[in-house]
Image (tube, helix red, strand yellow):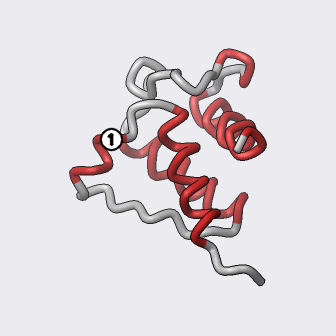
């Protein structure tokens, strides 16, 4: 999971123009300046990086549960865990 977090952290840091060393699992997306477009672009980048499909619907109220970088890493971990072995 730590490798997953490190990759997610790098994507998030790139998205918001910050140094990855400033990003932790508890970094608030809202405080970092994330908006809905940033979240979508991050999800697309994550899907490309990990070759997965992240179950994400911007109109789904559960998306409001994405409050921290750790939350994003969690959903990536879940998507990786449910991916069928090649």
Residue 53 image offset from top left, x and y in percent: 55, 69
Q: For this rendering, which residue is in front, 3 or 7?
A: 3
Residue 40 image offset from top left, x and y in percent: 45, 52
Identify the residue at horizontal 63%, vertical 54% (top origin).
45
Whether residue 71 is situated above or below residue 50 in the rendered picture: above
Whether residue 60 is situated above or below residue 69 in the rendered picture: below
Q: Quadrant of the N terminus?
A: top right
Residue 24 location, quadrant: top right
Element at label 1 = helix
Mark 1 is surrounded, within 10 Å at the Cα level, by few (under 14), some (14 to 19) or many (20 or more) other residues, namely: few
Identify the residue at horizontal 67%, vertical 15% (top origin).
22
Residue 29 image offset from top left, x and y in percent: 44, 28
Count how many numbered circles sit on residues in the image: 1
Q: For this rendering, which residue is in front, 14 or 20?
A: 20
Q: Is residue 45 left or right of residue 86?
A: left
Identify the residue at horizontal 55%, vertical 58% (top origin).
78
Residue 70 location, quadrant: top right
Q: Quadrant of the C terminus?
A: bottom right
* Residue farthest to the bottom, as pictured: 86
Residue 57 location, quadrant: bottom left
Residue marked by disc 1: 65
Residue 32 image offset from top left, x and y in percent: 48, 21
Whether residue 60 is situated above or below residue 72 in the rendered picture: below
Identify the residue at horizontal 51%, vertical 63% (top origin).
54
């Amino acid at each position: 999971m730590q490798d997953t977090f490190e990759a997610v952290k790098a994507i998030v840091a790139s998205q918001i123009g910050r140094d990855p060393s400033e990003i932790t699992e508890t970094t608030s997306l809202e405080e970092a300046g994330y908006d809905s477009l940033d979240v979508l672009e991050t999800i697309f980048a994550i899907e490309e990086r990990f070759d997965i499909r992240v179950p994400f619907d911007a109109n789904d109220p559960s998306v409001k549960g994405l409050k921290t970088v750790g939350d994003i890493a969690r959903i990536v971990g879940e998507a990786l865990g449910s991916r069928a072995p090649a």
